[in-house]
Amino acid sequence: MHTVELIKPDGRELTLYGRQPLASGIQAPSPFPAPLHANPHLRWNPLRGEWITYAAYRQDRTFLPPREYNPLAVTADASHPTEVPPGNWDVAVFENRFPSLSTGAGASPQLIVPSAPAKGRCEVVVFTQDADSSLGELALDHIELLLEVWADRTARLKAVTGIQYVLPFENRGAEVGVTLHHPHGQIYAYPFVPPVPARMQQCEIEHYRKNGSPLLTDLMRKEIDAKERVIYVGTHAAAFVPVCARYPYEVWVGTLEPVADFTRLTADQRRDLARALKTVLLKYDALWQRRFPYLMAWYQAPTDGEPHPECHLHAEFYPPSRARDKLKYLAGTELAAGMFAMDALPEDKARELQAVKVDIDRP
């Protein structure tokens, strides 16, 4: 992996990654000439026992721009500068111009509930220069590079004082709220462990103390033995529709052996994880004959310096899926109570994905 570190005109950091050595003299562009001086803050919800972040300036961020102006594309003119430069890079990472969390966050307002500066970091990860491509259409070695990039970003963000959790994710498709069509994801680095991974870890710790093995590792082995919902099994990674899926076509992807975070992956694990990831994404698109919308979230261990043998790095895909021509959006019981109500069996959705033939070695 090759890197170049740059600073944008408005002060934000930009890192370019490549599979080959990167050209010299690359300049960092920006659609914004001056710093935003973002100052998000947190407010405590006493009934839910969780923090909420507030960043009203995000209302001004770019939203579904016309194709002739894509701030993530490398072609631009003087009136429409972009976020990324031309060059022979493969993946680009830069600080979000409109962050929900910021290392520069200062004083928070005095309120009737506790508040605090929303100290953290939000990064944009551009998967490729090709605005018409997608993650699943990238070559396998390009996806392997992206896994390395996530590891590098995790390592860097671990070193930032106060960061407790790093979450890489991708929203794809207007159906799940994506604001730019160019293939990209984000990384949020939180000053606390967010509620969902915190609850996961609580269950993982209880299972590990009782059984001496990670919860997801044991579940994955049972899924592989059952075969019924498996989408991909390789020498080091697997993908499956979980028996407890909350969404139609929900898929989990992970290594066979437990790995706490991206920084612990071996080259062989990255290689097979890329194959598992591409298999799932190509099956999604082929099944629906369109670029399938989803949220992809990668869960890894907290960044507190502890070994966390209970944690198991994995991705979960949440599609707003069609089941009998009905999109699955959150219902009242799901939003209000947190109890999901499924009208499709995981086994049926797994069979549909299993039946789709794809060639992951084709560029």
Image (tube, rainbow, N blue to C red):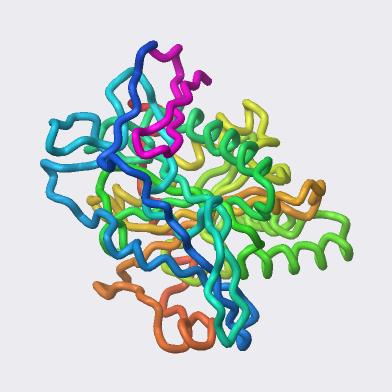
User: In the figure, 13 relative to 296: above or below?
Assistant: above
Q: Position of residue 341 (x, y in %)?
A: 47, 82
**Residue 276 locus on image (x, y percent):** 51, 41
> Within the magenta stretch, is there residue 161?
no
Which stretch appears magenta? 1-23
Rendering quarter of residue 175:
bottom left
Which of the image's four quarters has the C terminus? top left
Q: Is residue 12 rendered magenta in the image?
A: yes
Q: Is residue 4 above or below residue 239?
A: above
Q: Give above or below for 326 relative to 47.
A: above
x 78%, y 46%: residue: 305
* Viewer-proximal residue among 264 and 37: 37
Q: Can I make out residue 232 in this image?
A: yes
Query: Residue at the location (30% across, 72% down)?
Result: 327
Picture coordinates of residue 148, whole percent (x, y):
55, 31
Q: Residue drawn 64% across and 37% down?
A: 155
Q: Is residue 206 left or right of residue 66?
A: right
Residue shown at the point (34%, 62%) measured from the top left: 58
Left or right: residue 349 compared with residue 196: left
User: Measured from the top left, where is residue 94 in percent x and y?
Assistant: 42, 39
Number of numbered discs: 0
Residue 167 in sight: no
Q: Quadrant of residue 75?
A: top left
